[in-house]
Image (cartoon, rainbow, N blue to C red):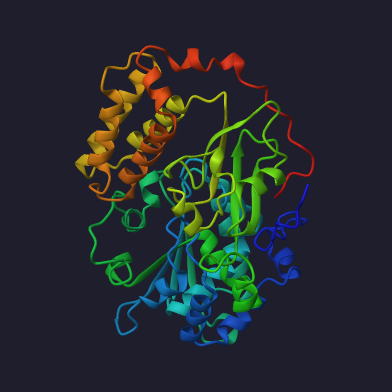
Amino acid sequence: MTTDVLTPVLTAGWGDDRAWTLEAYERRGGYQALRTGLAMSPADLTALVKDAGLRGRGGAGFPTGMKWSFIPQDNPKPKYLVVNADESEPGTCKDIPLMMASPHTLVEGVVLAAHAIRAERAFIYVRGEVLHVVRRLRAAVREAYEAGYLGADVLGTGVNVDLVVHAGAGAYICGEETALLDSLEGRRGQPRLRPPFPAVEGLYASPTVINNVESIASVPAIVRGGVEWFGSMGTEKSKGFTIYSLSGHVRRPGQYEAPLGVTLRQLLELGGGMRDGAELKFWTPGGSSTPLLTAEHLDVPLDYEGVSAAGSMLGTKALQVFDQTTSVVRCVLRWTEFYKHESCGKCTPCREGTWWLVQALQRLDTGQGRPGDVELLLDLCDNILGRSFCALGDGATSPITSAIKHFREEFEAGMHTPSRELFPPERSTAWARPLEGSPA
C-alpha cells in the first residue's frame, strides 16, 4: 500500500496520547503560529491567507482570504467570526473527528481569523446532536482561556478575543450560513434573502465572516509553513491539503488527508480497495447533494476544477462508494426523503418539490412506476433547480438528475420490477472486516 500520497497536517497528531488536551497540542507546536500571527497586522495576516490560496473547505470552495477582505472595516459596528460546525450533509464526517481529536487546532485558528478581521467575539456553531463534541470544544476553550490564548489581551498583544461554543438544535438547514445566523440569534433557522450579505449585515446585523471548521483549522498551519509550503501541495488553482472522508463499500473507511487533486483510485488503494467481491458502481465526490460519478471517473483529480469538469462538485469531499449490489433508485430515494424532511418550508419549490420527488421515487422503488415518471422527476428537478431560496433545493436535485443520466435503465425498470427484486439484500456481498492500521 502506498502512503506517500498522504500529507498529514491537520490529522498529524490524532493518534497521540490524549491528543485533545492543551498539553498534547503544545507538545506538537500548538499555539506557536498564534504568536507569529498576532505579531502581524490584520491586513498582513489576511494577505497571507489570500496569497496561500486557501479555499473554503465546507463545500463552495470560495477563497478564504478574499472572504475575510470583504469585511468593511469602516463600519462602526462590531465584527463577528462564526465557525460553521453544523456538519449534517449525508456522508460528511471530517469536521467532527477533527474537533474531537484536536479541538485546539480549531481554537488557535479562530483567534488568528478573528485577529485578521478585527473581531473581538467569535462563535462555533456545533450540530446539536454531537454533544460529545460540544463538551470537548468547551473543555478546550476553557483551557485556552486559562492559558491566556483567549480573552482580554491575548498573550499580552492587546488583542481581545472571546469565543462561545453554541449547540444548535439539530437542523440540516442550519448548515446554510444565513439560516445558521438566524438560529444563533435565537430564531427559527431559515435562509435569509441576500443582499445584504453577511459580510455587511450578518450576525446581529453586523459584519460577519462565516467559515467551515476545516478552513479555520488550516490557518495555523499556513502561518507556520508559509505560502510556498502550502502551495507545494495541491494543484495550481486548488492549493494545499484537505481531509477526504472515504466511506461505503471499501475495506478501510476513514479520513485520508491528502493534497487536493488526488484521485479516487489512489484513495481506494489507501483504503484497501473495495470490499471482497465488490465492483465500483457509483460514488459521490462531495456528499449526497453533489451529482453522482461512476467508475469511469476514477482518475478525475479531486480538486474544485477537476470535479467540476466531470460534471459534479467537490463539496465536502465526502466520498461515498457504492458497489454493484446497490440500487441507485433506492439510494437516491433515501437521500431525497432526507431532503424532504429537512426542508425548512420557506419556499414553495423546495417544500413542495421534494415531496413530489419522494412520491415518484417511492413508486419506482416498489415497481409501481407510472409511464412518464422518469420525465416527471426530471421536470420537477428542473422546476426546483435555481428557483429555491437556498442551495438545499438545488442539492436535492443533483443526485436524481445525475443518477438518471448514468442509470436510466434502473429507473425505467421501476415501472414493473421492485428494487428489492433487482438488487435482493441476500445477494449483497458480506462486509469485509476492517484492516489493521486504519487511518485517523
Q: Position of residue 188 (x, y in %)?
A: 29, 49
Q: Residue furthest front?
A: 296
Q: Is residue 65 left or right of residue 387?
A: right
Residue 24 lies in quadrant? bottom right
Q: Position of residue 241 (x, y in %)?
A: 61, 62
Q: Residue at x 44, y 25 (%)?
A: 330
Residue 124, placed above or below residue 354:
below
Q: Position of residue 325 (x, y in %)?
A: 57, 23
Foreground of the two, 184 or 304: 304
Q: Residue at x 56, y 46 (%)?
A: 93
Foreground of the two, 94 or 394: 394
Q: Is residue 368 visible?
A: yes
Q: Residue at x 61, y 60 (%)?
A: 103
Foreground of the two, 388 or 379: 379
Q: Is residue 160 visible?
A: no
Q: Residue furthest left?
A: 348
Q: Is residue 57 left or right of residue 397?
A: right
Foreground of the two, 129 or 255: 255
In this rendering, the count of numbered labels is 0
Q: Residue at x 38, y 32 (%)?
A: 404
Q: Position of residue 420 (x, y in %)?
A: 48, 15
Residue 154, placed above or below residue 333:
below
Residue 182 lies in quadrant? bottom left
